[in-house]
Amino acid sequence: MVKTTIYKKNYHIDLSDVDFTKSLRASTLLSYFQDVASLAAENLGAGIETLEETYGVAWVLMRIRVEIIRNPKLDEEIIIETWPQEPKKLEFERDFIVRDQEGNIIIRAVSAWVIMDVKERKLKRSSFISLTYPNVVEKRALDDPLGKLKSAGQLEGAYQKVIGYSDVDFNGHLNNSKYVDYMMDCFNLEDHRKYNVKSIEVNFTNEALPGETITLFKDTSQVDSNVVYIEGKNEKDEKIVFRAKVEIEVRH
């Protein structure tokens, strides 16, 4: 296998990938990103099985920001490009660009990943694994750096969710794409009919495990600026599981 820094994969948007407006679900988009990131890492010799068997660690997504220029629809073909940045002390940053069939960029995203010891559930430094790139791609999908999110106003309870079988990934914890489903369920169907998601930024702060209950809160103090803040708290230990900022716009 020839190693490549910029990895590309085509996706066809099927019925199972869209919502009731026939638009790509945000959670499906995140699943696509996880899929292509995993394949890209495997191409570079740091795939899921290699990391677990050689180092006893797994990739964990910590932060991501997605900006949606146009959300693709049912039956569209899209191409996702992804490439890594030079590793930092703890984090591995990875960028994504989504193009339509005409080659137009319709989605941009930046993300930060870490490696976690699968037995101790503790983070390891990036130097713990051997990972080299054929070349360094200096361009960024988005220029603004990823940061820490926090509420700007009063939080109000939205609903509670018990983590079940369908929510858990191969690492044994709540899958990142499911967080996005939980976030989208903080809005009713009329909201989804009226608004598009323009951008999503998520900080994944703590693990959530099967059987645990997550309480969702939202802060609508900035809704006049088309921004809604959402966070999830684990009822077991009251730790924040994720923090998110969703930017919306009226559908045309």
Image (cartoon, rainbow, N blue to C red):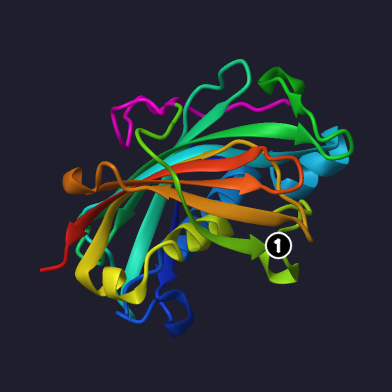
Q: Position of residue 118 (x, y in %)?
A: 83, 40
In the depicted view, which residue is nearer to us: 184 or 13?
184
Q: Is residue 250 above or below residue 7?
A: below
**Quadrant for the C terminus in the image:** bottom left
Where residue 99 sits, quadrant-wise, is bottom left
- Residue 234 in sight in this render: yes
Q: Nearer the viewer, residue 100 or 208?
A: 208
Residue at image location 64% in from the left, 32% down from the top? 114
Looking at the image, which residue is at 32% across and 29% down?
Answer: 139
Residue at left 79%, top 54%? 172
| Residue pointed to by mark 1 | 163
Q: Where is residue 158 shown, x and y percent of the image? A: 48, 59
Asked if residue 247 is among those painted magenta in the image, a careful observer would answer: no
Residue neighbourhood size for the residue with mark 1, other residues' Cα within 10 Å, grouped as few (<14), some (14–19), many (≥20): some
Q: Splitting the image into 4 quarters, where does residue 130 fall?
A: top right
Q: Is residue 142 magenta?
A: yes
Could one spot residue 7 in this view of the protein? no
Q: What is the x, y in percent for residue 82?
A: 44, 44
Q: Is residue 190 above or below residue 217?
A: below
Image spot of residue 244 (x, y percent): 44, 43
Q: Main secondary structure of the magenta part?
A: loop
Residues in magenta? 129-147
Residue 170 quadrant: bottom right
Q: What amino acid is found at the position of numbered circle 1 in the picture? A: Ile
Q: Which residue is pictured at 23% across the width and 64% down the height?
A: 195
Instruction: Check the image and report above or below for 91 versus 196.
Output: above
When the figure is inspected, residue 52 is found, relative to residue 127, above or below; the finding is below
In this orientation, which residue lies closer to the viewer: 19 or 212? 212
